[in-house]
Image (cartoon, rainbow, N blue to C red):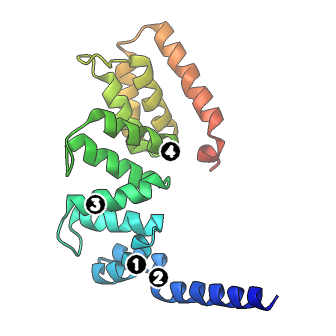
Amino acid sequence: MRSFSRIFIFAFALLCAATAWSGDFKKGWEAYSSTDYETALSEWQDLADAGDRDASYGMGLMYGNGFGVEMNDELALKYYGAAAEQGHADAQFNLAVMHQNGWGVPASDDNANKWYLLAAEQGVTGAQVALGRYYAMDFLDTYDPVEAYKWFGIAERLGDVDAIVKREFLASRMTSNQVAEADRIVDKWVQGHPTLFAN
């Protein structure tokens, strides 16, 4: 019993110490949003290095854009990657953009689409539009107007105004059967993601 108490006290002390030095994500976000990048960095660095997904995303933003630090694609990829692997949707989207554009890595549609898909499934409309554009390119072997329409349609339902124009243009080049099939797929996706449409 005594050894358990000592272990518990020791573990609690470690937890308190970690909290004391680890920083505050919210304080860092407020600083970042007001362009106080020095404070954001000091709040997020230790958190990110300890594996916090939100702080990792914040560090990715800083290094990916050169806000308060030298722009560094390698570090942006590291931090976005850490957050993305933990399911952070915006980090997944930004990581996809880096892979698509070849920023710090060889350009790769396959890698970009992997991360776009994960972000799109969480409701990131930018990722949905990116997937729609990819499948709408009729000069590629991956051309799939139904899949493109699906992603534009989902982004439209989530309020992306640009997706409306893209979906309508694509629909004008599709058969009525293709449009009907795509509409059914969009409806099914929306029904399968009720939390994204709760508001």
Of residue 188 and residue 79, the one placed in the foreground of this image is 79
Residue 64 seen anywhere in this rendered image of the structure: no
Residue 161 in the image, given as x and y percentages of width and height: 40, 40
Amino acid identity at mark 4: Gly
Q: Amino acid at mark 1?
A: Asp
**Residue 74 visible to an observer of this rendering:** yes
Q: Nearer the viewer, mark 4 or mark 3?
A: 3
User: Which residue position holds label 4?
Assistant: 123
Figure check: 194 above or below 35: above
Q: Would you name the residue on which mark 3 appears?
A: 76
Q: Secondary structure at mark 4?
A: loop
Q: CA distance from mark 4 to mark 3?
A: 22 Å
Tags 1 and 2 touching, CB below 8 Å: yes
Res. 46 mark:
1
Secondary structure at badge 1 equals helix
Q: Residue at point 50% right, 52% down? A: 87
Which of the two discs, 3 and 1, labels the residue nearer the N terminus? 1
N-terminal of the pair, mark 4 or mark 1, is 1
User: Left or right: 131 with respect to 180?
Assistant: left
Residue at image mark 2: 22
